Amino acid sequence: MEFTLTFIRGAFTQGGKEGRFLGRIDQPPHQDGIELMKNRARQRKYPVADAVFSSPLIRCADSARAIYPYSEIIVLERLTAFDYGEFSGKSYSEIIADKKFAHWARVDQLAAFPGGEAPYAFFGRCGEALREIIDHARAKGLEKVSVITHQSVIGAILRRHSIPHSLYNDYNLDYGASLATVCKTEPVALKVREKI
């Protein structure tokens, strides 16, 4: 089975405007970010979807409702952003200046950030989220599915399942941008079709 799977990055927040790594900080979307997404929806920049999945964090859930106001939003806990632990809410320059980050970068980059999530656990969780979406699409015979989530989740899923294989940052999306893929279910593979 194949179906169209479109990833959409949620609207920006005040922290996002400031270049902060929010991770699991549940900050609401900035009103300008929501308006941008509503305008894109009115211009039909987002695809029609048979099912809409969202991260439970408010910035994504509100984005999903802005784009798909008449659709049921299926919330998946596994679509939550990467947990930056003690680095959550900090800017890149603040993280780089932190002695704990320097120690982490020097000693064990596969370990969890202090108080945060281990990268291998995060990648596994994202893979489970994709499997859940695929199982739902197969059971319902869906042709078009949209997923509103975080850049960290989108990057993790594409890093593991895109063909040809991508690097984690190959498909960075702006806030509110989308990336359409063709999802092949057996074996799982995503072929990038269009980035908007």
Image (cartoon, rainbow, N blue to C red):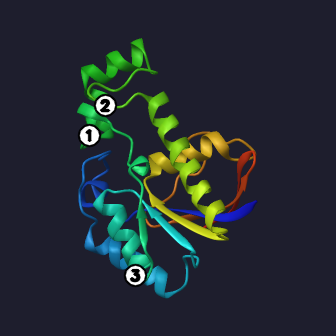
**Residue 122 spot, x, y in % from top left:** 45, 36
Categorize mark 2 by other alpha carbons within 10 Å: few (<14), some (14-19), many (20+).
Answer: some
> Which label's residue is closer to the chain start, 1 or 3?
3
Give the vertical position of 152 relative to 6 (above or below): above
Residue topped by disc 1: 88
**Which numbered circle lies on residue 69?**
3
Q: Residue furthest front?
A: 139
Q: Which residue is mark 2?
A: 116
Whichever of labels 2 and 1 marks the residue nearer the N terminus, that label is: 1
Local SS, label 1: loop
Question: Residue 141's x, y, as percent?
Answer: 67, 68
What label does residue 32 carry, if any? none
Residue closer to the observer: 121 or 156: 121
Q: Nearer the viewer, mark 1 or mark 3?
A: 3
CA–CA distance in space, label 1 to label 3: 30 Å
Circle 3/circle 2 CB separation < 8 Å: no
CB within 8 Å, label 2 to label 1: yes
For marks 3 and 2, give the CA distance: 33 Å
